[in-house]
Image (cartoon, coloured by chain):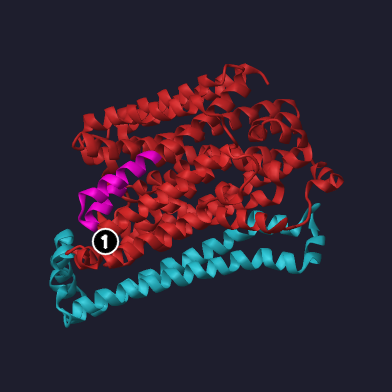
Chain colours: A red, B cyan
Amino acid sequence: MTPALGYASIAAVTVATILIGFFGVRISRTTSDFYVASRTVRPWWNASAIGGEYLSAASVLGIAGLVLLQGEAALWFPIGYTAGYLMLLLFVAAPLRRSGAYTVPDFTQARLESRAVRRVTSVLVIVIGWLYIVPQLQGAALTVGITTGLPRWVGAVAVAVIVGVVVAAGGMRSITFVQAFQYWLKLTAVAAPVVFVLLLQPGAGAAVVAVADAFPPFAVEGPDAVYRAVSLLIALLLGTLGLPHVLVRFYTNPDGPAARRTTLIVLCLLSGFYLFPVAIGMLGRVFLPGLAEGDPDALLLLLPAEVLPSPYAEAVTALVIAGAFGAFLSTSSGLVVSLAGVVSQELFGGSVRGFRIAAIGSVIVPLVIAGITESAGLAGSVGLVFAFTASTLCPVLVLGIWWRGLTARGAIAGMACGAVTCGTAILVGPLLSGSVPLLEQPAAWTVPIAALVMVLVSRADRRRIPRGVDRTLALLHLPER
Amino acid sequence: MPSEERPQRVRVTAPRRDDGVARPAPASGAGDPSALYVRTLIRSQRRLAIVCAVAFIVVLVAVPLVFVLVPSLDEATVGGVPVSWIVLGAGFFPVLIAIAALYVRTASRNEARYRSLADDDA
């Protein structure tokens, strides 16, 4: 691959991102502008922005790589990533918007009338954000390393710097435009290789038939495989509705019904998107099966050069690099916005200056973590963050919105329990020799434990049900008119 | 007639935020009809959400089960790719969108029903 191509497309997507971000700065002035775009973003813009923010390195590179590596078992990933939005729509979208809170900690504090709950939630949001930025930076390192030949850390540092600067300069308003642009860029990037292969390689169909063992029929390999699939789906379905960078987007809808419409559009956008990484993974099984032993996450970057004739191969590769780099930029900046919002409210009283300082701080920690850890498959490591979110923020949101009996102590106990069990599984799992499915995919048992602890402790603590609970629940569920 | 209704509506809804906070405040009284409406609304929205979630999970479990129970289904191929790959790779998305669209419609209808009850009462 020619390095010039890599440099050119990375530079182009960076300049576009900064320009759109800069254009947004002119509009954003007040604190409210900075945090949630003054809640005036239209559903289509907002939905594109959610799509752009959500489709991370794991979706753009990771799923194709996983289909190449694991075959049919990997197809549960895109299903789970999309179905998470159905759960978000059903259980969280409209009530969360109506709560009127800026961040998840704001919500838990308002609902449970406790500063302690707020602090615990803030810590969790920050940990989740950091964990989620790490694979984005590792994806950037992989992309820059493969496409330009530079040392891998350059990519991670570049993304961290760009994101820090854009977020600190413009806040969410500019990020909304950037994110919406990124969705369409990413869609083009994953669709182009598939479309061009189908147009320019009429023989591709014949090649698929010829490589018969590329697509083994549906098979279940023992109870471990079933457990893994079920646990993964639980993590993806429930993890989405606690992701801080996704939730912060819902505050930008004008009202509850708009939040629902936005989520419905997001579902359509994601459904359209995920067809392509799957198709690329399948093409990879036919044309590049050897890559499974090397860097399967690089499949999207290498496939166009492998199967397309000369001028098209370079053009599509450039587009793909831009899309992949866009993915790291957009997801990381979304996460940094939500992290910076939480940190600045906790430590700096929610001022604009505090937001800027917090934004810079929010990219430095993950950069250090990414520097000292090895990437172990992008889709897999993002899946673990989903498991952690599903075990901590998901139960407190769902019970807080739908169950009158939740108390501050119950919420804290449940979140702590989920964080400890899931966190231990994630940390200890890789250290053990041999594979232990219970630790590799912990969501199936850590989510029920967290929710159960939350319910039982709240029950025991019944006298401390927040005084304003009826008023708060009415605020969450009553239509705005 | 509509010309008389409209200004009234605007006057009631203008302080939206205060309205949401203030009205359910006396809800502690068990006999308060507006508190009853609120609880009914929350209950019907919760039931709707659970029904939709269960419907999706049933589909999610049923599809792999069918392929396990009837392996001969997967002998059929589309362009060299077994049917199960196509179904898992693309087939769930329309189901998701359909359930979501149904939910959005029904949830809004529940809210409209609450609104007409509350308005009748006022």
- In this view, the residue in front, A434 or A347, is A434
The answer to whether residue A13 is left or right of residue A108 is right
**Left or right side of A282 for A268:** left
Question: Where does residue A422 sit, x and y in percent of width and height?
Answer: 47, 48
Chain letter for the residue marked with disc 1 in the picture: A
Looking at the image, which residue is at 45% across and 49% down?
Answer: A421
Query: Which residue is at the front of the view, A2 or A370?
Result: A370
Secondary structure state at the residue bearing disc 1 = loop
- Extreme residue toward the front, this view: A433
Q: Which residue is mark 1?
A: A407
Which SS does the magenta portion mostly show?
helix
Q: Nearer the viewer, residue A170 or A460?
A: A460
* Residue at image location 22% in from the left, 35% down from the top: A347
Q: Identify whether B33 is placed above or below A193.
A: below
- Number of residues whose C-alpha sits closer than 10 Å to that of mark 1, classed few (under 14), some (14–19) or many (20 or more): many
Out of A453 and A295, give the one closest to the viewer: A453
* Span of residues in magenta: A104-127
**Quadrant of the snapshot with the N terminus of chain A:** top right
**Residue ID at (30%, 77%):** B40
Could you tell me residue A469's position as x and y percent? 21, 65
Please tell me whether residue A463 belongs to the stretch shown in magenta. no
Query: Relative to residue A156, is residue A268 depicted above or below?
Result: below
Question: What is the quadrant of residue A435 in the picture?
Answer: top right
Number of marks: 1
Q: Note whether residue A257 is visible.
A: no
Q: Position of residue A21 (x, y in %)?
A: 37, 31
Quadrant position of residue B42: bottom left
Which residue ends up furthest to the right in the rendered image? A210
